[in-house]
């Protein structure tokens, strides 16, 4: 039985690693002609216009960063509040209820958030912001609710991982819940907090539907959070190229390769954080 368990683990690791390697090879294969064309840096220019053979991905890269960063900021603030209340300041029954609610939210399809926002949030913002309802601000706000459960659950588990002996010792010395949380728990949770934020940010970058439906899909570089923008994921979904040899078609795979590189950097940063003493 022990042998079968270990064999199953080895097979699972092999299959997963092989799939990731095949995806990387697939993306590199289709992107390689662009990388070796001598005009590689032209793909990081300011404009995408297929008719004039302009394939600048910089607007999509910046749109991805703006929406993801703003969404992560919104979600981190809300998640920290939820996680701290659940871990130390709410009754156990209410904490269990909120924990189950967060788990439920983590399974809600993102298209539902976008669909509801289009009919409820966007019209209201159009009235307030003079027709700028489809914008970075709107997409980031809605996207924050998608990554909220991820960050909250990680923070909640991080706060609860503090040694119970230390907590009991602090209580016996007369420390309040606030003292324990701010002076002990937070100081021992820096790695967990950073990991939660990074994973939440990675989740935001990988989302497609909310950016596709709410961000406005403008091909221009945004100048403010009230401007429309397009992300790399939504760009892949929107570009329609039937000619496999066209630059447009191969540029889609370059977008995918950039997203894969970002995922690699995210995992690497998490490993660095877990190794370093913070």
Image (tube, helix red, strand yellow):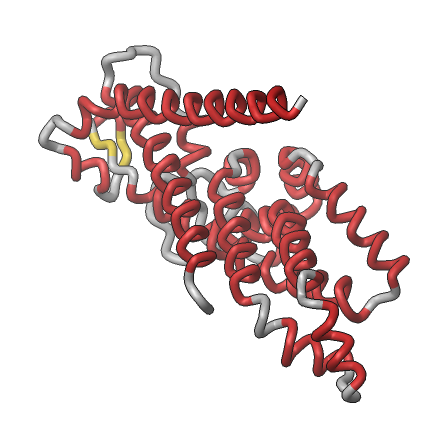
* Residue situated furthest right in the rendering: 93
From this view, report whether residue 180 is shown above or below residue 112.
below
Q: Viewer-proximal residue, 266 or 55?
A: 266
Which image quadrant is residue 84 in? Answer: bottom right
Residue 77: percent from left, percent from top: 61, 64
At horizontal 27% and vertical 31% (from top left) the residue drawn is 49
> Is residue 156 visible in this depiction of the protein?
yes
At horizontal 59% and vertical 60% (from top left) the residue drawn is 76
Number of numbered discs on residues: 0
From this view, report whether residue 243 is shown above or below residue 156.
above
Q: Viewer-proximal residue, 206 or 266?
A: 266
Which image quadrant is residue 74 in? Answer: bottom right
From this view, report whether residue 90 is shown above or below residue 258.
below
* Residue situated furthest left in the rendering: 38
Residue 185: percent from left, percent from top: 65, 72
At horizontal 22% and vertical 36% (from top left) the residue drawn is 43
Q: Viewer-proximal residue, 118 or 92?
A: 92
Residue 105: percent from left, percent from top: 72, 43
**Which image quarter holds the N terminus?**
top right
* Residue situated furthest bottom in the rendering: 174
Residue 179: percent from left, percent from top: 70, 83
At horizontal 67% and vertical 66% (from top left) the residue drawn is 162
> Is residue 126 visible in this depiction of the protein?
no
């Amino acid at each position: 039985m022990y042998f079968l368990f270990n064999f199953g683990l080895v097979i699972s690791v092999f299959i997963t690693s092989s799939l990731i390697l095949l995806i990387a090879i697939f993306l590199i294969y289709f992107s390689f002609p662009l990388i070796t064309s001598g005009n590689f840096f032209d793909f990081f220019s300011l404009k995408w216009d297929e008719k004039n053979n302009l394939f600048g991905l910089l607007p999509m890269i910046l749109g991805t960063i703006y929406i993801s960063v703003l969404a992560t900021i919104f979600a981190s603030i809300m998640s920290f509040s939820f996680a701290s209340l659940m871990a130390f300041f709410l009754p156990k029954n209410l904490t269990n209820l909120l924990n189950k609610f967060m788990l439920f939210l983590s399974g809600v399809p993102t298209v539902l958030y976008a669909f509801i926002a289009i009919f409820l949030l966007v019209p209201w913002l159009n009235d307030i912001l003079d027709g700028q309802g489809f914008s970075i601000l709107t997409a980031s706000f809605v996207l924050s609710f998608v990554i909220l459960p991820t960050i909250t659950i990680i923070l909640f588990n991080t706060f609860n991982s503090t040694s119970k002996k230390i907590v009991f010792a602090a209580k016996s010395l007369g420390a309040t819940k606030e003292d324990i949380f701010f002076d002990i728990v937070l100081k021992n949770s820096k790695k967990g907090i950073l990991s939660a934020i990074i994973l939440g940010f990675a989740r935001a970058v990988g989302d497609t539907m909310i950016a596709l439906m709410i961000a406005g899909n403008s091909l221009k570089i945004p100048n403010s959070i009230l401007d429309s923008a397009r992300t790399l994921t939504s760009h892949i979904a929107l570009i329609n190229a039937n000619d496999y040899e066209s630059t447009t078609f191969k540029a889609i795979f370059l977008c995918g390769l950039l997203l894969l590189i970002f995922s690699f950097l995210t995992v690497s940063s998490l490993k660095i954080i877990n190794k370093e003493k913070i």
